Image (cartoon, grey):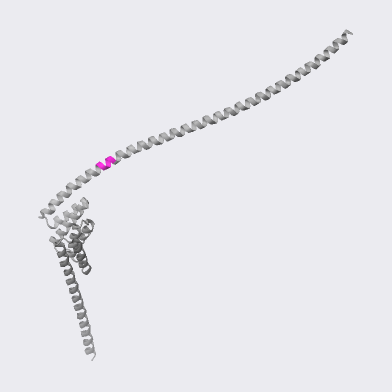
Amino acid sequence: MRSCKQITHYNWVKVSILMLLFTLYVSSSLFAQQDKKFIRDGNKAYENKKFNEAEKNYSKALNKNSNSYKGAFNLGDAYYKQNKFEEAAEQFQAATHHSTSKDTLAKAYHNLGNSLLKSKKYEDALNAYKNALKNNPNDEDTRYNYSYAQQMLKQQQQQQKKDKDKKDKKDKKDDKKKDKKEQDKKDENKKDEQKQDKEKQDKEKKEQQKISKEDAKRLLDALQNDEKNLQDKMKKAKVKGEKLQIEKDW
């Protein structure tokens, strides 16, 4: 009886597992069908150059199946056609992780390189083209684009050097102007200081002169007083002398 119960219990577990797997399979199949439907709708819109509509359908496909290579790759194409190169690069980069063959991987890297090229990220574009050529060495389009990216990178570096030299020259010129301005300011401050010193000296000189005049006046007054006192004394002395003379006549 125990073994019968155990066997019965085991069978129910097995059946439950099978039912769960079947449910998951059916769900995944439905999601896969929805994924493919959105991709088909996106392709139709893409062919009719309705790239914004195509973008929406490919995005819906990825919502159903985030690992869809076609969904990511085609969404990258839809972005690319709308000049959304950064968004396109993100999708092609994602497609490289969901690729199932060297051929599809090479295509994803090729389009990634194109998106980066349009964004003027030439070094990154070269790396993408290199990866594309590793997976498909015979792709002449990728080889041509790689060569073109090299030329564009060289021009970019030359332009950056010119811009840097121009900036350095401007900075030096600005530094000279700044130095001259600072020197002029120093000279102006020096003149102001000299002017203030002169005004201070003139003020002190005037005060000294004023004091000297006052001292001279006081001295003059004192001398005049002394002279008056002396004259008074002399007058008194003269008067006394005359009296004595008269007495002598006696």
Could you say where residue 165 lies in the image, as x and y percent from the top left? 27, 40
* 235, above or below 56, in the image: above
Residue for point 20% across, 52% down: 118
Task: State the residue in front, 159 or 104.
Answer: 159
Question: Would you identify the image quadrant in which residue 51 lies?
Answer: bottom left
* 188, above or below 59, in the image: above
Q: Is residue 66 visible?
A: no
Q: Is residue 152 magenta?
A: no
The quadrant in which the N terminus is found is: bottom left
Task: State the residue in front, 99 or 202.
Answer: 202
- In the displayed structure image, the side of residue 48 where residue 216 appears, left or right: right
* 86, above or below 176, in the image: below
Stretch of the chain drawn in magenta? 162-166
Could you say where residue 67 lies in the image, as x and y percent from the top left? 20, 66
Q: Is residue 165 magenta?
A: yes
Magenta span dominant secondary structure: helix
Task: State the residue in front, 148 or 18.
Answer: 148
Q: Is residue 235 visible?
A: yes
Residue ranking furthest to the right: 250
Question: Would you identify the image quadrant in which residue 42 lies?
Answer: bottom left
